[in-house]
Image (spheres, grey):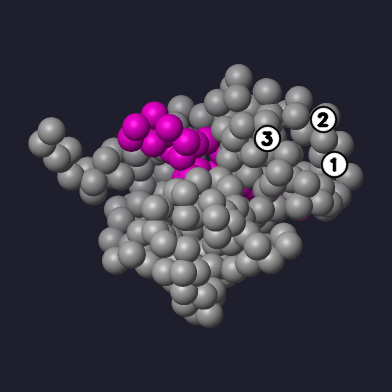
Amino acid sequence: MRLIGLLEVIAGKDRRYSLQGLVQETGLPKPTLHRMLQQLESTGLLQREGNGRHYGIGTRLRRLAENLLLNDSLHGARHMVLRQLVQEIGESCNLTALSGSEVVYLDRVETAAPLRFYLHPGSRVPVHCSASGKIFLAQMSLAQRRRLLSNAPLEPYTPKTLTDPEALEKEMRRVRKNGFAIDNEEFLPGLLCIAALVPSGDGGPSNLCIAVQAPVMRLDATKAKGLLPALQRATLALSRIAADSAGPAPDA
């Protein structure tokens, strides 16, 4: 249980911990904590970073978290929301989450239209030039966003990709004001995407988005905005599913 508690401490904040910092945070003796860190590092749940004196989330723990999102008991209910949304608007829809410096597709329902882009669950797209990625970036603090993007180069995937930090910051302000984000051929030529955040139950940051994708010959930015009411109804439905799965609040 102490190992689990230690993982919760490290995963619970957007920072990297030194051994001394963890001693202060947990109150555990330094020799005990050092031994625990060695155990977690040896299994890939934690990894050393920077100068080797700081610890962060390891690849194995990150993959575990992603697999839980992909395969949890909420999947069926969430999938039905996506299916209903696709039936309503006639375009492919994704459920997405932020994973490191990328956006991962947790689920996807394809349109029946013959012309479409095939991106399966588990696919990863860049955070800076995807609609969902912009949503996740926009809810971060400026410091968090800069830290993330400084380690994720703003690669130009198409001529429309935003690669200038100032231009991207301007886009973040627009996303926060509008409550949605659009990728207009910024990741793949010919693909337009609009995304909205799934509200968290406590009003804090969320790590779920719904995104609609379609070829630009069928969907332009103006038409995409017309899909927002349906998209937002779906985000609220997913938010209710998450709240119901959490059960009643414990008695004070």
Bounds of the magenta segment: 188-214
Furthest residue toward right: 159
Residue 163: which disc?
A: 1
Local crowd at mark 3 within 10 Å, few (<14), some, or many (≥20)?
A: few
Amino acid on which disc 3 is placed:
Ala
Amino acid on which disc 2 is placed:
Ala
**Residue 210 shows in this picture:** no
Q: Horizontal placement of 251 versus 171: left or right?
A: left
**Residue 198 shows in this picture:** yes
Q: Which residue is mark 3?
A: 143
Residue 4 vs 42, above or below: the answer is above
- Tell me the quarter of the picture where residue 129 sits: top right
Q: Earlier in the sequence, mark 3 or mark 2?
A: 3
Give how far across and how far down residue 31 sits, in percent: 46, 69
Image depth: mark 3 or mark 1 in front: 3
Q: Given contact means CB atoms under 8 Å apart, are the residues at marks 1 and 2 in contact?
A: yes
Amino acid on which disc 1 is placed:
Thr
Q: Earlier in the sequence, mark 3 or mark 1?
A: 3
User: Is residue 191 found inside the magenta-colored segment of the image?
Assistant: yes
Q: Which residue is mark 2?
A: 167
